[in-house]
């Protein structure tokens, strides 16, 4: 079973944000990736967008209305 969850670290222990569904003493492998801003001013939009690992067609930005609303804008194909 592979599962991604969020947790809060209180300085000593990680506290999952939801039940894990594991038996006591089950060994797991953890990979840590911060989800809250790690810098005083917060993340920039670009850092947030990159962290989402979005995938889309190469002409996504040029044809945004087409992909979001099914509208042709007269630009592009």
Image (cartoon, rainbow, N blue to C red):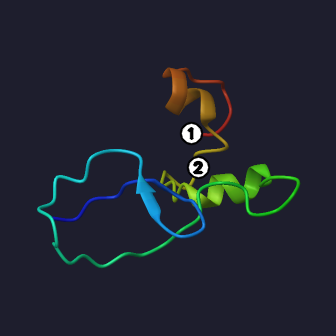
- Checking the image for residue 47, the label placed there is none
Which circle's residue, 2 or 1, is located before the other in the chain? 2
Tell me where residue 4 appears, x and y as whole percent.
Answer: 34, 58
- Checking the image for residue 59, the label placed there is 2
Tell me where residue 66 appears, x and y as whole percent.
Answer: 54, 29
Taking the spot 66% from the left edge, 44% from the top edge, the residue there is 61
Left or right, residue 16 beside residue 42: left
Is label 2 in contact with label 1 (beta carbons under 8 Å)?
yes
* Residue bearing the label numbered 1: 77
Mark 1 falls on what kind of element? Answer: loop
- The quarter in which the C terminus is drawn is top right
- The quarter in which the N terminus is drawn is bottom left
Q: Is residue 50 above or below residue 18?
A: below
Tell me where residue 45 appears, x and y as whole percent.
Answer: 76, 49
Tell which of 54 and 64 is nearer to you.
54
Left or right, residue 6 beside residue 73: left
Other residues around mark 2 within 10 Å, as few (<14) / some (14–19) / many (≥20): few
Tell which of 35 and 26 is nearer to you.
26
Tell me where residue 67 appears, x and y as whole percent.
Answer: 51, 32
| Location of residue 47 (image quadrant) | bottom right
Q: Is residue 49 above or below residue 68?
A: below
Mark 2 falls on what kind of element? Answer: loop
């Amino acid at each position: 079973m592979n599962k991604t969850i969020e947790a809060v670290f209180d300085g000593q222990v990680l506290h999952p944000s939801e039940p894990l569904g594991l038996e006591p003493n089950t060994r797991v492998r953890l990979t840590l990736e911060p989800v809250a801003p790690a810098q005083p001013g917060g993340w920039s939009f670009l850092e947030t967008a990159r962290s989402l690992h979005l995938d889309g067609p190469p002409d996504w930005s040029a044809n945004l209305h087409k992909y979001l609303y099914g509208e042709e804008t007269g630009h592009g194909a």
